[in-house]
Amino acid sequence: MKFRRFSSVFGTFHSSLFSSLALGSVGVIIFCGYWFFCRSTDIPAAKIPPLPQDESIQIYFNHDRAVEFTEPYRHKTRRGSDLAAQIILAIASAQLQIDIAVQELQLPNIAQALAARAQAGVKVRVILEHNYSRPSSELTVAEVDGLTAREREHYQEFQKLVDIDGNGTLTPAEINQRDALVILRNAQIPILDDTADGSKGSGLMHHKFMVVDRHRVLVTSANWTMSDVYGDLSHPDSEGNQNNLVQLESSEIAAAFANEFDLMWGNGTANNPSSQFKIRKPARTPVVVLVGNTRVWVQFSPTSKQQAWDDSSNGSIGKFLSSSMQQVDLALFVFSEPALASILQTQSQRGIQVRGVIDREFAYRDYSSGLTLMGVTCQANQSLQPLTTIGVPTLPTGDLLHHKFAIIDRRTVITGSHNWSNAANYHNDETLLVIQDNPTVAAHFDREFDRLYEHAIMGIPERLKHKVC
């Protein structure tokens, strides 16, 4: 399969903005570059009743239409659950120990909560991805000048967050109050990154989990940042990338995550072979335990390429997809695993309904498996029909679909930090979480999927079809 890049073809359209009126409650839709549509100003949807929560497995979404909250930094009241507030509640409950492995921690309210528990005598340990383990306030002028465009945008967002008085200068007082990593350091909270094993940190430490007192686990699809939880300060309409949080009450699940954390932490010092990241970790099989009355499957990446694909995290996803009897719904940030696309095509041919939304930044790239499902192929003897139920969501400018979930037969949920990609399978530290046969939990993901799917744009835009192959 080959799908050409289109940046040069559509560059002339990128500066043009065309507005049109949307149907229903979406409000004004803006054509915001290339073929993507973004919701710029939403008419608030009517509030809907909250769903019941499972006693041991609780689910939260930062765009849940059943609840609302006021953001602590922009002071904006909007629909959704405050994912950071859920994390802070769990932190505040800690009596003995908090272990966190998250790619990026930028939010000062979370850092302040961790500092408070550390000062109260709770043992706090934090693992970050090496690209995000240094306080941004320490970058020199020369380092800032050398940033890529994407890194510069990230740095500018950081500056807006920390610059409380808005005068363009970061004072020591502002840094101590708003630079999350400085807050942790001032509280003497130990931090490691994925170079602690003596490597250069190839691949990503992509986990997003917290273990509290070895009985409570929080797993998010979100990095703990403004853009993933609340929204970009540079985009007034942004309300945060679409993300979820799962909280599990189980000492057995906590033990599995604690073991993963301890492998990476080692003895807690840098450049020490006792720290094991990525493929240096020993081969492990999935952990399957009962949480309440629900079977929960936990698997950590990466998997060695010497092992069978079926034994990898992507292989496990494939097994669950193959078990579907009626319906599979997908909400994915990155989907670039051809074997999983093939399984979904086979299930569709068997009469199983397959629907999906893929983030617009990745859906049409030449390596996207979403293209395969949409019928884009250069194989001469391709006989499978394209799925007309795969598309991209309409989101506020600046926001991304950052979920990594699937719902099978409205009963089983696949989620975690694990994107459906080769990199997640073989190179990154990742969490795959499968909550089996629990319609109460699945109903929360059903509602989130339906929200995203309701105004999604299906298939390949007409103007792109002639560019295939």
Image: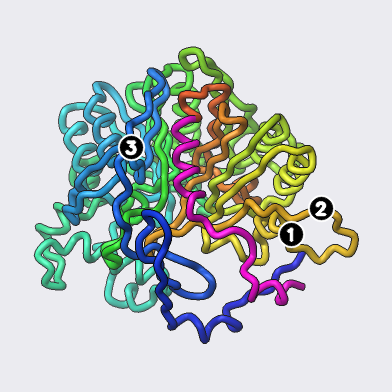
- Give the residue drawn at x 48%, y 55%: 455
Above or below for 128 versus 236: above
| Quadrant of the rendering where the N terminus is positioned | bottom right
Q: Visible in this render: residue 160?
A: yes
Mark 2: amino acid: Leu
Q: Residue tagged by mark 3? A: 48
Give me the C-alpha separation between circle 3 and circle 2: 39 Å
On the image, numbered disc 2 is attached to which residue? Answer: 384
Residue at the disc numbered 1: 375
Q: Residue at x 39, y 48 (%)?
A: 223
Label 3–label 2 contact, CB within 8 A: no
Q: Nearer the viewer, mark 3 or mark 2?
A: 3
Percent of width and height locating residue 53: 38, 24
Residue 463 covered by magenta stretch:
yes
Q: Are marks 3 and 1 in contact (CB under 8 Å)?
A: no
Please provide the residue range marked out in magenta.
Answer: 443-469
Q: Earlier in the sequence, mark 3 or mark 1?
A: 3
